[in-house]
Image: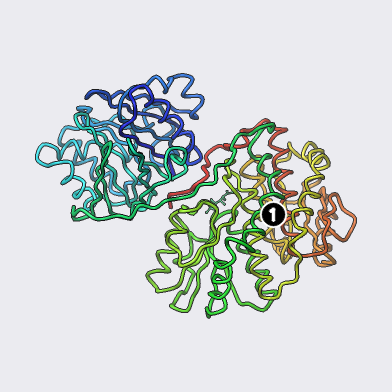
Amino acid sequence: MCGIFGIIGSKRNELGGILLKGIKRLEYRGYDSVGMAALDNGAIDVKKAAGKVDEVNKQLNFPKLIGNAGLAHSRWATCGGVTDNNAHPHQSCDKMITIVHNGIIDNFEELKQDLVKKGHKFSSETDSEVIAHYFEEKLASKSMREICVDFLREIKGTFAVLILKKDEDRIYALRRDSPLVLGICNDKNILASDIYAFSDLTNKAIFFENDEFAIVEKEKYGFFNKEGKEILKTIQEFKWEQEESEKKKYKHYMIKEIKEEPAVVKRLLFSLKTEQKDHFKKFIDLIKKSKKIVFTAAGTSYHASLLGVYYLHKCGIEAQTLIASEFRHFASVDKDTLVIAITQSGETMDVIDALKYVKEKDGKIASIVNVPYSTIQRMSKISLNILAGQEICVAATKSFVNQVTLLLAIAKEFGFKINLDNLPERIYGMLKSEEKISKLAKEIHRKRDIYVLGRGLSYPVAREVALKIKEISYIHAEGMMGGELKHGTIALIEDGTPVISLISNKDYDMLSNTKEVEARGARIIKITNEFDGDIKINTSNDGKFGILAAIFGQLLTYYIALEKGLPIDKPRNLAKSVTVK
Ligand code: F6R
């Protein structure tokens, strides 16, 4: 995780403002601490502290930083606690080298021991600081370019690193596995974790591949491979839909993004008939041609993939899904296997790792992605965009809805019966239950545990609802198969324990499971389209039920968290893009 941003060629007085804007756009990658470095006439000024960007900016006034080059970093702590000292940038003992880093240096303990023996003094507990001392140590006998080659050979782990050397007007940038992209402007160049960070300044970008480095100046740049040989790279012109990312009248991005769901579903469905039509057809053909279909994903996207498996099975297509972080251990892949990655960010390290395994085994890769030009999209033979637009709240809401909508559109091509045209209207109808759901939230917001039960299509939704409740409203929640409850978990049901039961159509087995917990004193919250319940879902279609029940869970989560006064858009310990294993 962590967001990194660097600029060379800015006007002196504009540097701090540009760094601040850039790092705000990357804050979704981590918000434990933030820091910046400004290079001005051979002097480097570093300001950094623990806290979110806005909080720290109030304290340190980043726009006051002046210079022609600078670095910025927003941290999601991996190695070393959330402290001012552990915030990036980090510097060498002589302050000649200043770095920001996203990733994990696996062999940092050995490197550090060696550097300490040579007299280096460390001022943080991070693995990243070792990079600054590593360069400082080697500078006695080598050029920066030579040290970059050594770095790619000797460093184990993952990294996107930006480096400033005090007496040079250039930024050194190195990448392995953590995302890094160069944004090319006429009079300046920018380096960042994603293109969104500079999409207001340029639409020209060069993506770093693994084990490449670049030396970037104001009006020129050079890319090099791990042997240090200069390489030619292609400039990609990208289109970034400029979306209003303001919260406008909403208190939080989470509720704003939930309310956008009818519109983003409409946009996706339209694009499948227009600009994504050919791609969509090719995607379907690829599924038809493949002997084996395996989805892979993490978190919420994994729950969407479980629904995908369910829908495909309903129309006779054999498919399975595997959590990305366990993919290598449980998947068998060969050249006839099509692996479909589902990911909002397109950068989740576990998913990237699963896809690397697919490549090793000669399997084919397709993906369903929200963030265009992301690493996973670029790794795929074919990729569809879910077009949910930028999702700022850490919790996935509208992106989940569009992932599932796209999976339904795919299943429909194989015979799944569904009218998707009225889905936006149905979602709109579901959003009208907001008041009822907020009352429910008031009733249960102090509970310690919540259980969510589902069967068949409502099982993945039960897991998704539970995940939302955990991450945003900090209540322990378990989403499970209704049938599995009696095999152990039922022992935890006490008088008044909330149990949310998702009952689609005439699922009498699910109804029996609900009664079993009710008989043991649970406070049942029935979400159903068929029976009497707390929330009525207005559809008889299994596909739409899944989406609408998930939206119930999103609203319930939001209102519980609101009642508890929690930091809804930036929950503790989390980040939007999970780029570590
Ligand atoms: C939950 C959530 C996470 C992500 C997971 C995968 O609300 O957002 O569980 O779903 O980290 O992320 P992507 O979809 O970007 O691969």
Would residue 130 be visible to someone looking at this image? no
The amino acid beneath tag 1 is Lys
Q: Residue furthest left?
A: 141
Q: Nearer the viewer, residue 142 or 511?
A: 142
- The residue under label 1 is 266
Q: Is residue 29 above or below residue 527?
A: above
Q: Nearer the viewer, residue 426 or 352?
A: 426
Mark 1 secondary-structure assignment: helix
Determine crowd level at label 1: few under 14, some 14-19, many 20+ residues with C-alpha closer than 10 A: many
Q: Residue furthest front?
A: 186
Where does the N terminus fall, quadrant-wise? top left
Q: Give the residue displayed 60% in from the left and 63% down from the top.
A: 305
Rendering colour mode = rainbow
Q: Give the residue displayed 32% in from the left and 26% down from the top.
A: 38
Q: Give the residue displayed 49% in from the left and 54% down from the top.
A: 346
Q: Give the residue displayed 43% in from the left and 20% down from the top.
A: 60
Q: Nearer the viewer, residue 474 or 237?
A: 237
User: Residue 401 location, x and y as percent?
Assistant: 66, 54
User: Residue 44 location, x and y as percent?
Assistant: 27, 25
User: Residue 488 location, x and y as percent?
Assistant: 69, 60
Quarter assignment of residue 439: top right
Would residue 346 be visible to someone looking at this image? yes
Q: Is residue 226 above or below residue 258?
A: below
